[in-house]
Amino acid sequence: MRITTLEALAEKIKSCRDVTILTHSHPDGDCTGAGLGLCYYFRSVGVRANVKNSDGFPKLFDFLTDGYQDQEFEEKFVISVDVATPELLGDSLSCYAERVDLCIDHHRSNSGYAKDSYVDGGCCAACLIIYELLKLLGAKLTPLIADCLYTGIATDTGCFMFDSTGPGAHSAAAGLMEAGCRAAAINRRMFQIKSRGRILAEHRVIDTMTFSDDGRIALIAVTNEIIDGCGIDRAELDGFAGIPLSVEGVEIGITLKQQPDESYRASVRTVSADASAIAARFGGGGHIRAAGCTVGGTKEEAARAVMAVAAEYL
């Protein structure tokens, strides 16, 4: 059942006890912030809660996870956050595919797999939904909860530069700063500081850049050889998706990231084309300006396939 109002979602949250919160595999700032922020809220009001991720949370987000420990309880309610389809939970959490009681998400492509769902496809981040939810619940936002939610909003809006960034994101950021979030430190960590390995990887990846359609489409490929050779954590790959679109004249940027199983994950970023429609052609989805999908074949085959489809949406 679709929950259509934030008020109804708040009533549902009030009744939750002994909660397991699920986030998608290969965790980013939004699912990490939303999952942990909601968990810390539950614990602050005496509700036992844990967060699970099939890959664990990257070191990049250790300022949100430091001190976190699982609580012992018999699970009674399961919530997923920022998870559009059960496949995105990953292999380790596949047992939950048909056991999610409530999904809170901001992807229009949400498949409706949960018993109850609250999906706001016009919202820039799952963390913004959680922020508005906690405000409605009259929750006290601790500095840690504020850090969690700010991280998700900042990362999913590209530090407030993406088209999806609306007044609500800026208003929430102001409210979270008032609650004690470390906005400047988080922005520096998420968007400025890079490991030496990542700097080396960026140079190697830029060398792979190819163009089509008079330079309006650009593609880069992040192979396992580059990842292993530069010694970078896969969590550091999130920022690579913006590289192709930073080139003057490019309207559709595509980033191929080779997976451990040798397949390629394509991240599509656009200026005006519908990225979600491009990704949907390969069974993926996402947002109108940012979407993703998995593409089979060699690097060359995957590149040709995605670029050919992208050209149809120029």
Image: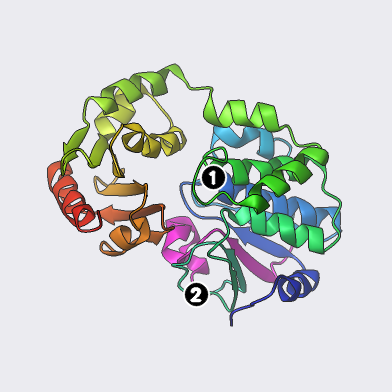
Q: Position of residue 17 (x, y in %)?
A: 77, 68
Pointer 2 local density, CA inside 10 Å: few below 14, some 14–19, many at least 20: some
* CB contact under 8 Å: marks 2 and 1: no
Pointer 1: what residue? 157
Q: Position of residue 142 (x, y in %)?
A: 83, 44
Helix, strand or loop status at disc 2: loop
Q: Position of residue 259 (x, y in %)?
A: 31, 44
Q: Which of the two discs, 2 and 1, sits closer to the camera?
A: 1
Q: Position of residue 74 (x, y in %)?
A: 72, 66
**With 183 as the anchor, is 179 left or right in this view?**
right
Looking at the figure, which quarter contains the N terminus?
bottom right
Q: Which region of the structure is painted magenta?
A: 73-97
Q: Earlier in the sequence, mark 2 or mark 1?
A: 2
**With 313 as the anchor, is 134 left or right in this view?**
right
| Residue 19 in view, yes or no | yes
Residue 292 part of the magenta segment: no
Pointer 2: what residue? 113
Cα separation between marks 2 and 1? 26 Å
Q: Amino acid at mark 1?
A: Thr
Q: Amino acid at mark 2?
A: Tyr
Residue 91 part of the magenta segment: yes
